[in-house]
Image (cartoon, rainbow, N blue to C red):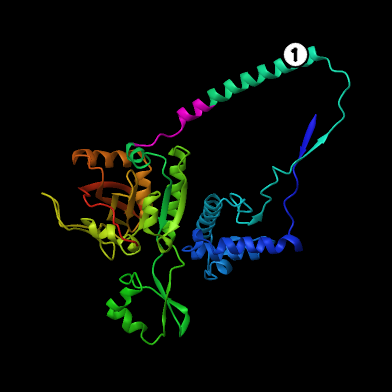
Amino acid sequence: MAATLTPPLPQETAENGDALEAHVQRILGSPQFARAETQRRLLEYLWQHRHENLNEYALATEGLGRSHSFDSTVDASVRVHISRLRRKLKDYYQETGEPEMLVIPTRTHQLLVVDPHRAEHSEAVESPVEPLVDYRRLLWIMCAVAAVFAVSTVWLLIARKGAEANAPQPTAFWANFLQGNAPVQIILPTPTFFQFSNSPSLRLRSTSVNSFEAMKTDPVFAAMTKDLGTPRLEQSYTVTWDTLAAIDMARYLDTIGNNKQRISFQVTRDSSMLMLEQANVIALGTHQTLEPLNQYLKAMNFTLSLEEAEVVNAHPAAGEPARFDAVEQSTERAVRPSIIALLPGRKPGLKVLILQSRDTAALVSMLSSSAGSNSIQEMLRKNGNPPYYEMVVQTEMANNRAVRSWPVAVHAFRSGAPNSTM
C-alpha cells in the first residue's frame, strides 16, 4: 500500500526570500488594503517579527501604537484587528487568485508562511507488494469495510440531524435580518482624536468634533488648540465597551447563523458605502462615533443627544413625548434611552442595523435573548410591521449593569439608502 508524505513548510532561503518579500509588499499595496491603514501596519509588523513569539501587549504597544498602559483583559482591540487582518488576507487571495502563502491560524496572532502547493507536491512511497493475493478474502474484507462505513455514515447523519434540531433557532428578528446568504459586517466606532505637531504625545477629543472639517465649527476646541501646531487626525482607538459588545454579538450570531454567512469586523475609520452593497451591516456606537453613517442618522426621526442623556423625537406621533429623557432614580440606578434602527442597504435584501447607546452591550443582550427579541416583534406588530424602522429602547441600569430593556416607541423608516460616499 502507498503512504503519503507531506513536505515541511517552506523555509526562507536566499533564493525565495526576495520573492516572499515582494509578495508581502504586493499585499500591502493592494486595493484590499488601500483603506485599511491599521491592517497594513499590523501585517507589516507581523511580517517583520514573524520569527518571534509575540504577545498581545507587544502587538498593541509596538504594532498598533497603543499606550504602555494597555491591558488585554479590558481592551480587545488586538484580537479584533487580528481577526480583521485574517479576513483581509483571505479576501486578497480569493479576489486576486494568488496562491495562499500568508496565514494567521485561528486563535493565534502569529503570521506563518505556508507552501501553497504542498498538496500537489506530496510524494508517494511504495512498499513491497505480496506476490500472491487471495481475492476472495480481499472481497470479504472490502464488503465488511463497506458495511461499517455505511453504518457509520447513517449514524453520523442521525447525529447531525439531532445536533441541527437542538441548535438555537433564530428569533423572528434575526431570521429577518439574516435572510439570504449575505455576509455580516460588524462596524466598531473609532472616535475622532487629534494630534498636534508641537505636542506629539498629546491627543485631544471633543465629542462635538467628529471630522477634520468640524474643527472649525467648534470655537472652544479651536481656541484650546490654536497654539499646539498643525493638527493631524488620529483614529487608532476603538471604544472598549462597544468592542466587547460586538464580540458578544458575533458569538451569538455564530450560534444561529446558517454557516454560509461570514461574520467580519470593520471600523468606522476604514468604512465606505461599498460595504452597504456587499453585506448586512451592524454598527455600534453613539450619534458622534457613528459619524460615517451620518446620512442615515440625518434621515432618522430619533436622535441620541450629545451626552446620551436623551433621545429627541423630531416628529412625535399621537401620545408620544418630544423627548425620551434619562431618569436618575438613585446614585446606583438609572433608566437610559437608546435607539435600535433597522435600515435598508444599497442592494435589495441587504440591511443596516444601527445600535446607538451609551451602553451598546445592553442592546446586544436584548437582541440576543428571546424575551428581548419578542418584545421588539410585539412592538412592531402593534405598529403595522414596517420592513424598516427606528425604535427607542429604555434600559434600566443598576451599578452600571443592564437589568432589563424594553421598547417604548417605533417609527417606520421611509427613506432609502444614501447614494453618496461616506
x, y percentage for residue 141?
A: 75, 16
Q: Badge 1 is on which residue?
A: 140
| Rendered residue at 61%/61% (across/down) | 24
x, y percentage for residue 44?
A: 59, 65
Region in magenta? 160-171
State whether residue 231 is above or below residue 332.
below
Does the stretch in magenta take in 217? no
| Rendered residue at 69%/42% (across/down) | 119
Could you say which is closer to the camera, residue 122 or residue 290?
A: 122
| Residue 74 visible in the picture | no
x, y percentage for residue 286?
A: 33, 60
State whether residue 112 is above or below residue 49.
above
Q: Is residue 23 left or right of residue 336?
A: right
In what quadrant of the picture does the C terminus appear? Answer: bottom left
What is the residue that sits farthest to the front in this orientation?
A: 97
Q: Is residue 284 left or right of residue 393?
A: right
Could you say which is closer to the camera, residue 298 or residue 236?
A: 298
Q: SS for tag 1?
A: helix
Could you say which is closer to the camera, residue 97 or residue 61?
A: 97
Numbered label tally: 1
| Residue 366 visible in the picture | yes
